[in-house]
Image: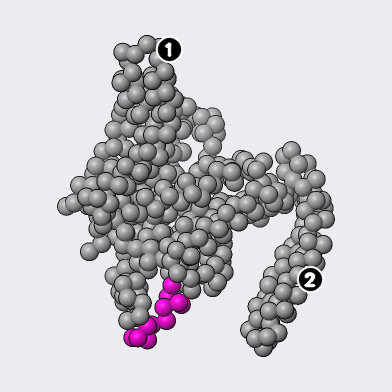
Amino acid sequence: MRALGLFALVAALILGTGVLQSWNSALIILNMGLVSAIMSLGVNLQWGLAGLFNVGVMGFVALGGLAVVLTSVAPVPAAWAAGGGRAIAALILGAAVITLAALAWRGLAHRRRGLAVAAILLVGLVAFRWVLDPATAAIESVDPAATGYLGGLGLPVLLAWPVGGLLAAGVAWMIGKTALGLRSDYLAIATLGIAEIIIAVLKNEDWLARGVKNVIGLPRPLPYEIDLQQTPGFAERAAGMGLDVTTASTLYVKVGYSLLFAAVLVAVLVLAQLALKSPWGRMMRAIRDNEEAAEAMGKDVTARHLQVFILGSVLCGIAGAMMTTLDGQLTPSSYQPLRYTFLIWVMVIVGGSGNNLGAVLGGFLIWFLWVQVEPMGQWLMGLLTAGMADDSAIRNHLLDSVQHMRLLTMGVILLLVLRFAPRGLLPEK
């Protein structure tokens, strides 16, 4: 009953937004709430189920966004002709150097392997840059105002969502093999640093995804509003419902995204619940609660940690691909690890760590507050300063500070929940 009541409250808040503001705003909140809920489920798998402190969430989300470009954007023939083959050869060379260094580390004697690995990596780096740099310069010089990158495979955009999960899984595997043996606070530092590296690559490697010049006009799984408006049948149906065709087309597209995202969320939630109640889920909770006892019972703790770290990262990658598809563009500068990773963690903590329904609830509730706090703060400050003179320094300061209400509100909510409901609104059973 408590869960039903809280979800009913969130539904009432979104419906109230539609009634009091606009249905367009309500659907925007709903769609990003669905995406946020999937991210929260991913973090809940890692932290709530296994106790892994990952603060590199935004790095995996950014990989999902990159997957949309690499999968769905049409290839740029001129860029491929200028340096595409050489760029691919450089990437293969880099992978071969890393593999050779790993084999040397494992196969050589302890005294020799340090120097051997350092030599392999140094020579490999020089060779890698010698092959890659001319290729990237040639690619980025091809119509840099419009392209200047290789493009993608030109496949349907919905395929980019699982590809985003696979790309995140590959990076999570590499991170996990090196960082999961660290203590929780060092793991947090490592994942945050790696997320920053991922986003720095997206911002600076123009040949890959245009860097800070952004990739706009990404393919969509739904029709464009202008195409709907030019369809006679659609215009007639919109008129029959008492809507102008522009509003109807906008709502139609957003409702379509809501249905797609809801289908993904329901599938992920069902799988997460089945995993939670399975022997595997009980084993993961046992490892989380007492690693030494689990190891004494013969459980491979490191392997299980790697497994759940990859699964949680897959969900973040899928959510990142969905978010980029919804936006219709890839904007690397918008991925801010400290800001948005903090927001996802607030969703998990407020909703209830270890409870999948709590993670979903937190995703919807916190995103709603994140969007609506600023306009509500603007209204509140306007009400409080209504009797002050227009040139009042206090009035101007309060009105100018409204934009900071979001972070202040998130902090207050987090403190209140930790004080009065330390296990979250829907605690783990």
Q: In which quarter of the image is residue 267?
A: bottom left
Q: Give the range drawn in magenta.
A: 295-305
Q: Is the residue under label 2 in contact with that under label 1 (CB below 8 Å)? A: no
Query: In the depicted view, which residue is nearer to us: 415 or 424?
Result: 415
**Magenta highlight on residue 322:** no
- Three-letter amino acid code at the position of disc 2: Val
| Residue 25 locus on image (x, y percent) | 40, 33
| Residue 292 locus on image (x, y percent) | 35, 80
Up-down: is 286 above or below 273?
A: below
- Three-letter amino acid code at the position of disc 1: Asp
Location of mark 2 (residue): 123
Element type at mark 1: loop
| Residue 101 locus on image (x, y percent) | 69, 76
Up-down: is 148 above or below 402?
A: below
Q: Can residue 93 be seen in this view?
A: no
Q: Residue 391 carries which label?
A: 1
Residue under the image location 76 percent in, 41 percent down: 144
Q: Which mark is residue 418?
A: none
Residue under the image location 68 percent in, 82 percent down: 113
Element type at mark 2: helix
